[in-house]
Amino acid sequence: MTLKNILYFAFVAALFIGTGILQSWNLALSVLNYAIISAVMAQGVNMQWGYAGLFNTGVMGFVALGGLAVVLTSAAPVPDAWAAGGPRILGALVLGALIIGLAIFLYKRMHKGRARNLTMLVVLVGGFFLYRAVLDPAVVAVEAVRPASAGFLGGLGLPILFSWPVGGVLAAVAAWAIGKTALGLRSDYLAIATLGIAEIVLAVMKNEDWMDRGVKNVISLPRPVPYEVNLQQAPWFLDMAAKYHFDPVVGSSVMVKLMYAGLFSVVLIIVLILAELMLKSPWGRMMRAIRDNETAAEAMGKDVTRRHLQVFILGSAVIGIAGAMMTTIDGQLTPTSYQPLRYTFLVWVMVIVGGSGNNWGSLLGGFLIWWLWSQMESIGPATMGLITAGLPDGGLKSHLIDAAAQMRLLMMGVVLLLVLRFSPRGLIPER
């Protein structure tokens, strides 16, 4: 790593330390935790774009699947809901999978023509109505079980750390399904397809209450770290607070955030090490060769579509793990909170500003851009107040100050333009 790169990371570290000194360590650690999660997301996107040139605009969908995995894995089960319709819902899902499998089997075995088309129409349309006939009554029964507090099947009740790899697996399975149909398309078509599929994932999560309560949200998810109130009642923690003269209430919040930071950092370090090993391996060199010239790679006997599918699945799995981490620290699943601006556009800005194709660049971009994004909402009004200090109260001054909270959108655009102008390959470009 060059001196310039070390200075970049030192500058970003100074931003977080300055936040702790000038504002509060509680805030600084909160921003740090989300920055670590954002850096993991950026690593997943960098695998897809930086390694293989795959333009995935459906990042939001894979993040949401990671969040869904937390509910399915770690939320407490609802026995009454399972008794009302759980087995029938599982049976309907198995039936749906069998219908799709039958359609694929017939499509491959039958000769192209009118008979195959009619057969596919009968199987898919008839199978759809059969599937809904089995599923719908069970869904109604489950969602009628205490709809204000439950109304869904719940999860398996496992420790929440188990949900992180499950989030990666769930995102990887979805990426495989998407990749088998969309990776043969041109890059612009792939972008449209992934964006549309991400919206479909969110639509399902918002409307299938039996699975995740939809827009009513799943709250009170288990935590991998103690609750603040438990720390405040622990004798050893109170003794430490008395010894070092700090407020137990504030100290408990800082301690919990430090525990989260430790867990998230372990995941980030593992992902970064594996990403570096992948990039420097023969497989990584092959992926970059495919990215730079697919025609030449195909001429050398490389299966381009298969390799694209591999890296698309790997990157999506990393994004899914980050999505599970995000839901873990939030303590709840809120499907309406998944917005393209936050979970697709901002992650792309992190990769582009940091330097696509370079894992350290994506790491830097994740920390820097998230700090700017989170801090500009508070810095913006203060900055606008100084700018408009000479204007009379009311009118234009009030309008500018009220709109200052949106300065972070302007700031993201300015940062992106400046980096593309003066360092087109990012702050830490690919070597």
Image (cartoon, rainbow, N blue to C red):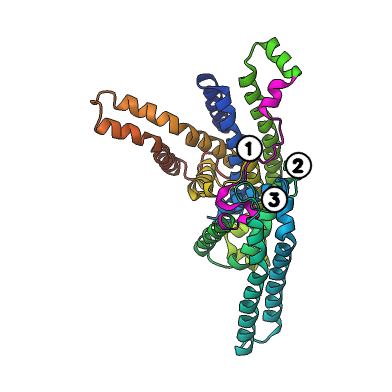
Q: Which residues are drawn in magenta?
A: 206-234
**Visible residue check, residue 73:** yes
**In 3D space, how far apart are the residues under numbered discs 1 and 3 (Cα atoms)?**
19 Å
Residue in view at x 52 percent, y 24 percent: 19
Task: Return the residue nearer the eye: 430 or 386.
Answer: 386
Query: Quick one: SS at disc 3?
Result: loop
Query: Quick one: SS at disc 2?
Result: loop
Residue 407, x across and y down, in percent: 39, 37
Q: How crowded is mark 2: few (under 14 residues within 10 Å), some or many (20 or more)?
A: some
**Visible residue check, residue 304:** no
Residue in view at x 63 percent, y 61 percent: 140
**56 to the left or right of 407:** right
Give, as a three-letter code, the residue at label 2. Answer: Pro
**In 3D space, how far apart are the residues under numbered discs 3 and 2 (Cα atoms)?**
14 Å
Taking the magenta stretch, the answer to whether it contains residue 228 is yes
Residue 164 circle label: none
Q: Residues within 10 Å of mark 1 (few under 14, many from 20)?
A: many
Residue that numbered label 3 is attached to: 154
**In 3D space, how far apart are the residues under numbered discs 1 and 2 (Cα atoms)?**
14 Å
Residue 159 circle label: 2
Q: In this view, does 114 lie above or below 424?
A: below
Give, as a three-letter code, the residue at label 1. Answer: Ile
Task: Return the residue nearer the eye: 170 or 109.
Answer: 170
Residue that numbered label 1 is attached to: 329
- Contact between marks 1 and 2 (CB within 8 A): the answer is no
Give, as a three-letter code, the residue at label 3. Answer: Gly
Mark 1 vs mark 2: which is more N-terminal?
2
- On the rendered image, what quadrant is the N terminus found in? top right
**Which picture quadrant has residue 414?**
top left
Q: Residues within 10 Å of mark 3 (few under 14, many from 20)?
A: many
Residue 326, x across and y down, in percent: 62, 42
